[in-house]
């Protein structure tokens, strides 16, 4: 049977799990084998982080996913440590990806403006033919979608001083120059413009900032955009299989990264971040985060690392 959302399920049953009070949630965790030495501490955390959200951090410690029985050596402190690790990991990722995003946006604006002028983004001739082809699903081309979103963005941002001053002072062109407008464009819109650029030399010029091949930068930036959105929406990172993966290139292969793992994401971020912010202590902070939270009970292999993760060559500069 297909649902209204389009999903196909067979042999469906009726959902019967009742809502549980916080105390009942604690009792259920104890019944499943989780060691809870401090009920009040657990109660506090469950009042701040939902049982459903936290259950995703309990699952790796289960010995039976059907019965949800938990390894008897695991305590609530182990679960909470994993949760905190993942939260702080997201913050570190956001810190690095923000700098990469700003640098990419800057290179995109600088290279294209110097070559084609301040309103290059309006010149459809600079983009692949598919940029102007109508999408039957939306009845609009990517170009039309982009201009439509820019119009909406400019209306929303009229309270911002730079946009407000432009429309107050100038009657034409109708839209602001790229260096002003692109401060407010989403990362996704910037990566989309880059992807649709027709001239390979333009992509090479923009990518030269990162000292990587243009095709590598294109796939890597798209992967980082996906990861950034995961972080911004508080999604789990540590055990995720990243479906948007960068193109394989020498530096990733040399790091022995399994595609789709957290380790691959870390190596990718560090490659870009080391160019953008060479004096940053980002990797050292990441190493310290690992050291603080990874114990013998931590399922480190789910991140793409070996049990002796400290010996990985990626940490050489931290030791």
Image (cartoon, grey):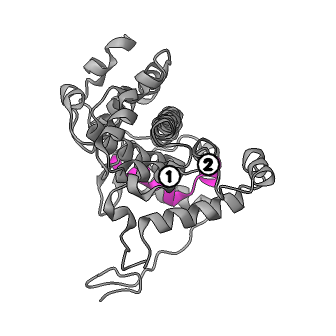
- Residue placed most toward the observer, 310 or 221: 221
Residue lying furthest bottom in this view?
Answer: 1
How far across and down, in percent of the image, does residue 47 sit? 64, 54
**Which residue does the numbered mark 1 point to in the structure image?**
121
Position of 66 relative to 298 (above/below): below
Q: Is residue 77 visible?
A: no
Q: Is residue 271 visible?
A: yes
Q: Main secondary structure of the magenta part?
A: helix
How far across and down, in percent of the image, does residue 63 sit? 28, 51
> Circle 2 — which element?
helix
How far across and down, in percent of the image, does residue 94 sit? 52, 38
Which one is in front in this view, the residue at disc 1 or the one at disc 2?
1
> Circle 1 — which element?
helix
Tell me whether the residue at label 1 lies in contact with that at label 2, contact meaning CB atoms closer than 8 angstroms. yes
How far across and down, in percent of the image, does residue 303 sit? 31, 38
Residue name at image x 29 percent, y 63 percent? 66
Position of 87 relative to 4 (above/below): above
Q: Quadrant of residue 156?
A: bottom right
Residue name at image x 32 percent, y 84 percent? 12
Please state the extent of the stretch shown in magenta in the rendering: 43-60
Residue name at image x 61 percent, y 44 percent? 183
Instruction: Report if residue 18 lies within the magenta region.
Output: no
- Residue placed most toward the observer, 294 or 171: 171
Instruction: Report if residue 52 lies within the magenta region.
Output: yes
**Which residue does the numbered mark 2 point to in the structure image?**
181
Say whether residue 157 is left or right of residue 271: right
């Amino acid at each position: 049977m297909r649902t209204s959302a389009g999903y196909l399920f067979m042999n469906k049953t009726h959902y019967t799990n009742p809502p549980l009070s916080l105390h009942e949630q604690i009792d259920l965790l104890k019944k499943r084998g989780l060691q809870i030495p401090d009920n009040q501490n657990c109660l506090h955390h469950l009042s701040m982080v939902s049982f459903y959200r936290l259950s995703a951090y309990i699952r790796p410690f289960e010995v039976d996913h059907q019965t949800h029985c938990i390894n008897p050596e695991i305590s609530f402190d182990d679960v909470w440590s994993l949760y905190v690790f993942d939260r702080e990991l997201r913050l570190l990722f956001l810190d690095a990806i923000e700098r990469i995003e700003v640098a990419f946006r800057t290179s995109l604006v600088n290279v294209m403006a110097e070559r084609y002028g301040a309103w290059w983004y309006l010149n459809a001739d600079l983009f692949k033919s598919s940029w102007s082809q109508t999408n039957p699903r939306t009845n609009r081309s990517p170009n039309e979608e982009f201009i439509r979103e820019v119009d909406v963005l400019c209306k929303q941002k009229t309270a911002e001083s730079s946009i407000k001053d432009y429309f107050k002072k100038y009657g034409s062109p109708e839209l602001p120059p790229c260096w002003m407008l692109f401060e407010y464009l989403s990362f996704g819109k910037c990566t989309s413009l880059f992807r649709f650029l027709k001239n390979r030399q333009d992509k090479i010029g923009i990518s030269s900032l990162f000292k990587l091949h243009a095709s590598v930068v294109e796939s890597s930036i798209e992967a980082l955009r996906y990861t950034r959105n995961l972080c911004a929406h508080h999604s789990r990172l540590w055990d995720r299989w990243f479906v948007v993966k960068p193109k394989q290139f020498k530096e990733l292969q040399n790091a022995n990264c399994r595609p789709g793992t957290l380790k691959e994401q870390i190596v990718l971020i560090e490659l870009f971040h080391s160019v953008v912010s060479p004096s940053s202590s980002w990797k050292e902070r990441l190493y310290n985060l690992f050291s603080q939270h990874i114990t013998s009970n931590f399922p480190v292999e789910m991140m793409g690392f070996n049990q002796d993760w400290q010996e990985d060559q990626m940490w050489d500069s931290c030791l």
